[in-house]
Every structure is written in C-alpha cells, then in structure tokens.
Image (cartoon, helix red, strand yellow):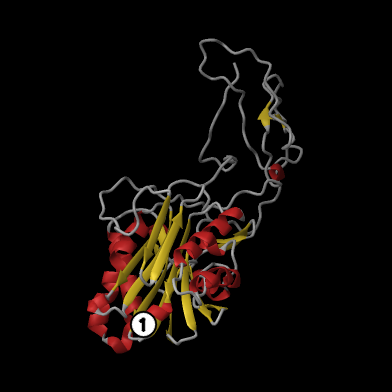
C-alpha cells in the first residue's frame, strides 16, 4: 500500500503555495516533484532511495494497486532540497541561516465600526465630492483591503480638510480601524499641541492610533498616506508605501518616500534592532515576511515595523494644481509623472473639472498593465482650498 505524508514542520517540506507576503523559494533550489519509489529495496548503506523527477515533467504515477478500503490514494511524496541529496552525503551547512518563517495570524471576525466612506464588500468604490474624488477597485487576490477617509469643513472651516488612503495587508481590519479613527486623533492632538506644531500632532496621532489598534488584538496592518489642509498649509504624511504626488504646473513632485526594507536607512534601523532583512525574487522583506518597513498594526513584527510617519509641510500656492493620494496598487504600475499627465487634462483649464474620471482612468491603466493588487486613487483639487 502506498502512503502520502504531509510534514508541515519538517525542514524538508516545501509548500506549493505561500501567502503573497512571504518570500517564495527559488524553484532552482528545490525539486518540485521528488518521490520515494515504493518498489525499490532499501539497503543499510542507503536507508532511503529517492527518484527525483524533472521539475518540468508531471509526477510519475505509482503502479502499486490501491486498496478499495484504503483512504490513502497517492504515493509517498517528500519534497527535498536538491543540495542535500548528493550521492547519499550531506552538503556542509551554510554559515548564515535565515530565521524561521513567521506566520501572520488570521483574526476572527469582529464587530467593528466601519468607516462609512468605504462600503464593506464592494468590488469598487466611487465618490465624487466638491474638492476631491475617490475611486477604489478590488484586485484579483481576494476581498478589497484598501480603505480611505475624507473629512472636510473641519471646525466649520471649508478651507480645512483631512484626507487619507490606507492599504491593508493580512486583513482589512487595520485599514478599517485607521480610516475611522486617525482623522479624529489628529484633530485631538492638534488641539493639545497648538497650530504651531501640527506635524508633531500628526506623528502622535499615528502612534496613538497604532497603540489603540494593537490593543484590539486583531491581525494584519495597514500602510497610510494622509494629507491635512490647514489655513493654506498642506501637511502630507506616510507610513509604508502609499504615496502622495503633487502636480506643480504639470510637473510631478513626490511628497512622500516609500518605506521599504530596501531603503538603506530603514534597513540599518531594522538590523540595529536585531531584525533580519533580505531580498527574495527582487523584493526586500523583513523576517522573510513583510515588504514594508513602516505601518500601523503588524503586531507580530512591531519590534521592527514602526508606525511613526514622515511628514512634509508646504504652502499651497497657485501653481499647486492637485494632489494624488494612492495605494501601491497604482504606483507599482504607473510612474509619478504618468499619473500627473493623465489627471491634468481632467482637472486643469476646465470650467467643470472631472477628477473622478481621472481617478478611474488611473486605476484602469494600472489594472491594464497587470496589477493584481487593490487600487485606490484619490485626487484632491488644491485650488479649492487656497487660503
């Protein structure tokens, strides 16, 4: 009788699929279809005889007849690194070993207040309001994990507003929580620190929101990019790889820097704290897991993945035409200048601008170029908020 074993904790187990946030094993390092030949005799000098199939060829079918009463239908299959099979001898171990893969827990369903601006379970979100527009499109990987928030007429002032785009990972709970709470925390902190220290208030609000979410004991995390408009000043903050791009007379100007482990300063910070950063298939990851170095949430990596944002302040001038806030589902396929060039004809020089159409065109372009991720795009018409 042939036997099929699955050994999830064995160092020789190689899953066919791993979550998208983990590094995938290099196909050249592991054989995709080795099996034990059930008819081959074992000898003392060779305790286990293996026949390795070519990765490109299908698995050979065992000729051993199956018992009708046996629930086990497939031959014993074990995935073994090729470098450990060298005529029955072991290859010397490598000097540096990566840490064990960290499993991100999947949180159970929790009743949580949801940001009204982003409907739950939607394939897409379409919002067109005075001064801003939003378009969110679900990717091909599963449920939408992107969220957004928009608060205008802050303190009764039509020239004050707060906008945000949040790209969740590992679940949508963190993005939901931040979309609902971050703008309120920012306003609370501004009232404490005063108008002369708004950048400090934003930083404190990010950190407090992160601590509050961690207390909820839910999995996942979220990247954030926010824009606060206050008395003619623009404060743009980010943690992660959501990005803000300004059009200044048609020239794209990135107002944020993506937080990736590939950044030398971020990598140095993580390694100084004992973290492990490496590049797998062209993507730099922390502990072989997360591809961003700052985010709200991510409790299992909190020692290295911080929520402290970087903030840039500038004065809104007549040449500041519009601001694009978007998740990496857009920026992974569309450059900053391409985005500005596409949006500008819809927003500049028109009696009736059409920023929503521009948002949708950007998302469609990214999707057409092969993006599998959720795509969220917000366009803020800065001339509407000139002080």
- The residue that appears at 53% across and 32% down in the rendered structure is 6
- Helix, strand or loop for disc 1: helix
Between 15 and 204, the one lying in front of the other is 204
Q: Is 387 above or below relative to 23?
A: below
The residue carrying pointer 1 sits among few (fewer than 14), some (14 to 19) or many (20 or more) residues within 10 Å by Cα, namely many
- Camera sees residue 298: no
Q: Which residue is mark 1?
A: 199
Furthest residue in direction bottom, as rendered: 196
| 212 sits to left or right of 244 | left
- The residue that appears at 28% across and 57% down in the rendered structure is 216
Q: Position of residue 23 (x, y in %)?
A: 57, 53
Q: Position of residue 234 (x, y in %)?
A: 40, 82
Between 164 and 341, the one lying in front of the other is 341
Where is the C terminus found, in terms of image quarters? Answer: bottom left
Q: Position of residue 61 (x, y in %)?
A: 68, 22
- The residue that appears at 23% across and 82% down in the rendered structure is 192
Q: Position of residue 383 (x, y in %)?
A: 42, 80
Between 237 and 2, the one lying in front of the other is 237
Where is the N terminus found, in terms of image quarters? Answer: top right
Q: Is 119 above or below relative to 213?
A: above
Q: Quadrant of residue 253?
A: bottom right
């Amino acid at each position: 009788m042939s036997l099929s074993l699955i050994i999830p904790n064995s160092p020789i187990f190689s899953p066919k699929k791993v979550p998208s946030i983990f590094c995938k094993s290099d196909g050249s390092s592991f054989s995709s279809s080795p099996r034990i030949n059930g008819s081959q005799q074992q000898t003392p000098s060779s305790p286990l005889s293996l026949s390795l199939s070519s990765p490109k060829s299908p698995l050979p079918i065992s000729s051993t007849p199956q018992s009708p009463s046996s629930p086990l239908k497939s031959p014993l299959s074990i995935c073994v690194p090729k470098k450990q099979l060298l005529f029955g001898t072991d290859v010397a171990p490598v000097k540096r070993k990566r840490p064990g893969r960290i499993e991100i827990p999947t949180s159970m369903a929790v009743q949580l207040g949801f940001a009204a601006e982003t409907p739950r379970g939607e394939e897409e979100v379409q919002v067109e309001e005075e001064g801003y527009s939003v378009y969110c499109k679900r990717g091909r990987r599963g449920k939408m994990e992107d969220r957004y928030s928009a608060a205008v007429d802050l303190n009764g002032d039509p020239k004050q507003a707060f906008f945000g785009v949040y790209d969740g990972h590992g679940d949508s709970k963190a993005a939901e929580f931040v979309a609902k709470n971050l703008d309120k925390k920012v306003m609370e902190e501004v009232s404490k620190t005063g108008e002369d220290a708004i950048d400090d208030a934003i930083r404190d609000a990010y950190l407090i929101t992160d601590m509050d979410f961690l207390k909820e004991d839910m999995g996942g995390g979220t990247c954030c990019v926010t824009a606060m408009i206050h008395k003619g000043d623009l404060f743009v903050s980010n943690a992660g790889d959501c990005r803000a791009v300004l059009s200044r007379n048609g020239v794209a100007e990135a107002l944020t820097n993506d937080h990736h482990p590939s950044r030398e300063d971020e990598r140095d910070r993580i390694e100084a704290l004992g973290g492990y950063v490496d590049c797998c298939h062209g993507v730099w990851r922390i502990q072989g897991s997360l591809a961003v170095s700052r985010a709200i949430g991510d409790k299992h990596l909190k020692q290295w993945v911080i929520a402290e944002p970087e903030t840039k302040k500038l004065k809104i001038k007549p040449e500041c035409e519009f601001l694009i806030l978007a998740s990496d589902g857009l920026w992974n396929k569309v450059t900053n200048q391409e985005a500005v060039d596409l949006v500008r004809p819809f927003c500049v020089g028109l009696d009736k601008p059409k920023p929503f159409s521009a948002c949708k065109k950007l998302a469609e372009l990214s999707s057409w170029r092969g993006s599998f991720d959720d795509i969220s795009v917000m366009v803020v018409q800065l001339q509407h908020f000139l002080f």
